[in-house]
Amino acid sequence: MDSVRYDREPGAPQVPLALKILIAGGFGAGKTTLVSALSEVRPLQTEEVLTGAGLGTDDVSGVEQKTTTTVAMDFGRITINDDLQVYLFGTPGQDRFWFLWDELAFGALGAVVLADTRRLADCFPSIDYFEQRGIPFVVGVNCFEGSRRFGLEAVRDALDLDPDVPLVLCDARDRQSGKLVLISLVEHVARQRGEPVPVG
């Protein structure tokens, strides 16, 4: 794994292994919502109110009701057991904050790319980023109320995804749905590394 737990001195307190997972996608795709739904602690958020200064820069077509935006990252934590914790890092969605991505991606196990079928093209930059850097990822199609539904194969074709990239439907507001997306990612990483895929 990219995340490392160093050997400890005998009698020293055990430090849990930490796995880092990125939550990426376009502006308004549900990244902050997913981190908030999954985190067992109050998530760290860097949300700021959209103002007139963003006019002409932030494209809100299709997400006109959105009033805030992530300007650095979202952060959440999930404790699997005493030996394992998962840290979630939500990336900013707008182009002008992409300079933060390399820092956020350093040491990541993999990524979830949230796709919004109302603005499907917005997740292309995330997909390109992870493909170019060889970072394993899955695509979660966030099912927004009132949005048109498409079959997974139609979405896969539209995104030109490799056949081995998992594509799943999800609801970013629902903790259990989010967990299934994370499980899909962990299984995908295990398959790529030739490791046993966790069952159950």
Image: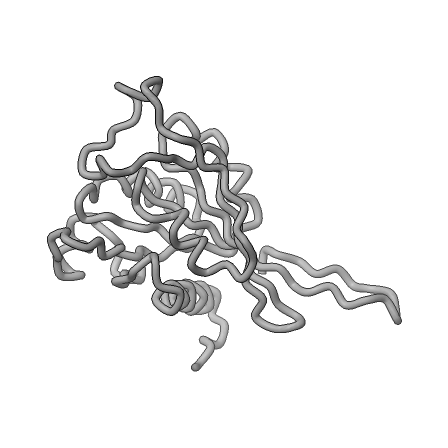
For image coordinates 11% across by 53% down, the residue present is 148
Would you identify the image quadrant in which residue 133 lies? top left
Q: Position of residue 57 (x, y in %)?
A: 30, 21
Task: Give the percent coordinates (x, y) of residue 6.
Answer: 75, 60
Q: Picture quarter containing residue 68?
A: top left
Residue 46, visible in the rendered structure: yes
- Asked if residue 98 lies left or right of residue 168, the reply is right
Q: Quadrant of residue 165?
A: bottom left
Is 64 on the left or on the right of 128, as rendered?
Answer: left
Query: In this rendering, is residue 169 above or below 105?
Result: below
The image shows residue 116 at horizontal and vertical percentages of 24, 48
> In x, y percent, where is residue 34?
39, 54
Q: Which residue is rendered at x = 12% and y = 57% of the image? A: 150
Above/below status of 135 relative to 52: below
Name which residue lies at 45% across and 37% down.
Answer: 47
Identify which residue, 37 or 164, lies in the foreground.
37
Rendered residue at 53%/62% (across/down): 40
Question: In this figure, which colouring scheme has been used for the structure?
Answer: one colour
* Image quarter of the C terminus: bottom left
Left of 63 or right of it: where is 40? Answer: right
From the viewer's side, name the closer residue of 200 and 47: 47
For the N terminus, which image quadrant? bottom right
In the picture shown, does residue 100 fall above or below 20? above
What is the tally of numbered marks visible in this picture?
A: 0
Can residue 192 be seen here? The reply is: no
